[in-house]
Image: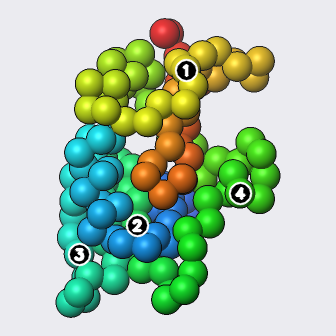
Amino acid sequence: MPQTQATPILQCRSIAPQFAVPNVVTAAEYYRDALGFRICGYFGDPPVFAIVARDQVEIQFGQLDSGSDASPNVRRREDGLDAYIWVCDADLLYAELSARGAKILAGPVTREYQCYELLVEDIFGFRLVFAVDLASSSR
């Protein structure tokens, strides 16, 4: 009897946004100290690239070209966000980030689209939402 070969399934598993910042070391240290990420590494001497991670979430920082400014989405769109991160418990994260001194702009709050969101802003103006999908969670 002939064996059938399993067809591989293509699946996107994660994403790592890359923010262009004036100083990658300052950015990475802020994400470590205020947002609870770990620094995975710096690249270049002096560093021109860095990676931070928290659980399955990774964010990369690239050094801006000389004379350029950081350009978070909020500068081009009033409600612009730079990363939307799914979490299991926004209340627990809120307590942790508050204690760390993170800049919390809103939340946690339930939105009309049934997500419970915490909005934070980093030192260069990039905005991240940490959210729980209420429709698929037992919050």
Chain-order first, disc 1 or disc 3 = 3
Crowd tier of the residue under label 4, counting other residues whose Cα lies within 10 Å: few below 14, some 14–19, many 20 or above: few
Q: Position of residue 107 (x, y in %)?
A: 55, 20
Element at badge 4? Answer: helix
> In front here: 65 or 108?
65
Local secondary structure at mark 2: strand
Kind of residue indicated by mark 3: Tyr
Q: Which residue is mark 1?
A: 107
Residue 114 image point, x, y percent: 69, 18
Residue 90 occupies quadrant: top left
- Picture quadrant where residue 97 is located: top left
Mark nearer the viewer, 4 or 1:
4
Location of mark 3 (residue): 42
- In percent of width and height, residue 36 lies at 26, 41
Picture disc at residue 66 = none
Is 127 on the left or on the right of 100, as rendered? right
Q: Is residue 115 above or below residue 38?
A: above
Q: Which mark is residue 75?
A: 4
Q: Earlier in the sequence, mark 4 or mark 2?
A: 2
Of badges 4 and 2, the one in the foreground is 4
Find the distance from the CA under tag 1 to the CA under tag 3: 32 Å
Question: From mark 4 to mark 1, how far is it between C-alphas?
Answer: 21 Å
How far is the residue under mark 2 from the one under mark 1?
Answer: 25 Å
Q: Amino acid at mark 4?
A: Arg
* Closer mark to the observer between disc 2 and disc 1: 1
Q: Dot 1 lies on which element?
A: strand
Q: Residue at x 74, y 42 (%)?
A: 79
Q: CA distance from mark 4 to mark 2?
A: 20 Å
The residue labelled by disc 2 is: 60
Q: Going from the N terminus, do you reach mark 3 or mark 2 first?
A: 3
